[in-house]
Image (tube, grey):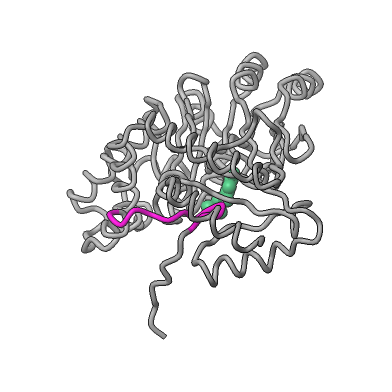
């Protein structure tokens, strides 16, 4: 079987459609992972990642693997067995954080809220007060299972007031809404390439500040995962250039091009584009009489959960949307399974013409 182009428009929760120049960059003839040209591409990529994360953190790089590898990197490096970690859960990816933190040996204290809402700072403060010696507070910035934007400022302040590190999942937020790592004092942050950064899945940008790095450097035990050990990875991405594992060269070419395009557009312009297209989609869906799942005031522009009335077979509609219109959207997760769609306007997919096309297709399908 030959691989064939399907010409899909990806409007699901990720991956998103990517700019043709990003695909072209992936097809750049290979060079070695220690070739001086490639090392320059890596350095450039790091510089651009710092701009997108809005940080000066020296330790800013792209881990090999998808967003979950970023999550795992942060927890396996920062957590030692028995450490207390508060994990905020407002959807599937908060739950995944809890699982990953526990597998890293953490004693996890959860702070939860019903799906569709954001975590309240008071809840986090209560947990911090009740638990001595919390090492880190972890939270998802853009909960892809619900479409909720989690405000971070207050929770960052609380974590620091209680001497804890602040860990943020920015897989769906980075490039779509501001992720102000230095301004908020986020100690460790990770993302993925296939959402608002506009590259295919395969890399997990990660950044750690000096405080978090000190925790990694002063561990009493070796990091359990050889592959994700930042002490070693940093020596390849840093000045020493020690071989650790063979870098996924084509993926880094693609990320470099996606970041170049994003910064050429300008971060602020990209945020405005995401905001405008999200607002258009959400207001038109409401005009069609459909319900938005995320609480008002906390809706992500780049990820919309829309709930269908009883009697609508969303699975059938989604199948038709793909087969007849070539458009992919995501189904609901958890309690939203079979009742909702998750529509992504992520990165290059966030274009007005895509919103218009999708709305027209939905009107035709819903009759
Ligand atoms: N965190 C969030 C908020 C996500 O949306 C996702 C993926 O959708 C992940 C983590 C995991 O990323 P990946 O599927 O790239 O491993």
Give 103 or 270, whichever is nearer the viewer: 270
* Residue 93 horizontal/vertical position (percent): 65, 45
In the image, the segment drawn in magenta is 10-21
Q: Position of residue 179 (x, y in %)?
A: 48, 30
Residue 211, relative to residue 149: is it above or below?
Answer: above
Residue 19 on the magenta segment:
yes
Work out whether 287 lies above or below 88: below
Residue 33: percent from the left, percent from the top?
27, 55
Majority secondary structure in the magenta region: loop
Residue 261 lies left or right of residue 91; in this view the side is left
- Nearest to the observer: residue 310 or residue 331: 310
Q: Looking at the rendering, in which quadrant would you find the C terminus? A: bottom right
Identify the image quadrant of residue 201: bottom left
Residue 346 visible within the image: yes
Q: Nearer the viewer, residue 11 or 32?
A: 11
Query: Which percent across, then down, holds residue 162?
Result: 67, 16
Residue, x 52% and y 27% (percent of image)? Answer: 187
Between residues 260 and 345, which one lies in front from this camera angle? 345
Q: Quadrant of the N terminus?
A: bottom left
The residue that appears at 75% across and 61% down in the rendered structure is: 312
Q: Residue at x 73, y 39 (%)?
A: 116
Residue located farthest toward the top when viewing the structure as drawn? 161
- Is residue 63 highlighted in magenta? no
Residue lying at the far front in this picture: please name it: 367
**How many numbered circles does the render carry?**
0
Residue 224 appears in the rendering: no
Residue 141 falls left or right of residue 175: right
């Amino acid at each position: 079987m030959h691989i064939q182009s399907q010409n899909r428009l990806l409007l699901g929760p990720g991956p998103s459609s990517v700019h043709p120049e990003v695909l072209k960059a992936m097809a750049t003839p290979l060079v070695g992972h220690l070739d001086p040209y490639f090392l320059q591409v890596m350095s450039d990529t790091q510089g651009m990642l710092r701009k997108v994360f809005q940080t000066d953190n020296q330790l800013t790089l792209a881990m090999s693997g998808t967003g979950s590898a970023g999550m795992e990197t942060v927890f396996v490096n920062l957590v030692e067995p028995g450490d207390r970690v508060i994990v905020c859960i407002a959807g599937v990816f908060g739950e995944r954080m809890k699982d990953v933190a526990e597998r890293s040996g953490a004693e996890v204290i959860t702070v939860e809220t019903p799906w569709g809402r954001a975590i309240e700072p008071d809840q986090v403060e209560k947990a911090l007060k009740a638990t001595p010696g919390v090492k880190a507070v972890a939270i998802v910035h853009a909960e892809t299972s619900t479409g909720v934007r989690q405000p971070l400022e207050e929770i960052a302040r609380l974590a620091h007031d209680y001497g804890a590190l602040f860990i943020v999942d920015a897989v769906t937020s980075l490039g779509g809404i501001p992720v102000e790592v230095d301004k908020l004092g986020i100690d460790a942050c990770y993302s993925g390439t296939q959402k608002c950064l506009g590259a295919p899945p395969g890399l997990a940008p990660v950044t750690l500040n000096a405080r978090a790095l000190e925790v990694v450097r002063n561990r009493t035990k070796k990091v359990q995962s050889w592959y994700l050990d930042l002490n070693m990875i940093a020596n390849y991405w840093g000045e020493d250039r020690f071989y650790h594992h063979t870098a996924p060269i084509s993926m880094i070419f693609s990320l470099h091009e996606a970041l170049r395009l994003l910064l050429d557009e300008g971060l602020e312009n990209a945020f405005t584009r995401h905001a405008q297209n999200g607002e258009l989609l959400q207001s038109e869906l409401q005009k069609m009489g459909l319900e938005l799942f995320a609480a008002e005031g906390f809706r992500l522009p780049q990820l919309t959960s829309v709930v269908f009335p009883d009697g609508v077979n969303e699975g059938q509609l989604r199948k038709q949307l793909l087969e007849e219109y070539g458009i992919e959207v995501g189904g609901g997760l958890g309690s939203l399974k079979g009742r909702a769609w998750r529509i992504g306007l992520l990165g290059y997919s966030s274009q007005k013409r895509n919103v218009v096309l999708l709305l027209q297709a939905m009107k035709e399908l819903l009759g």
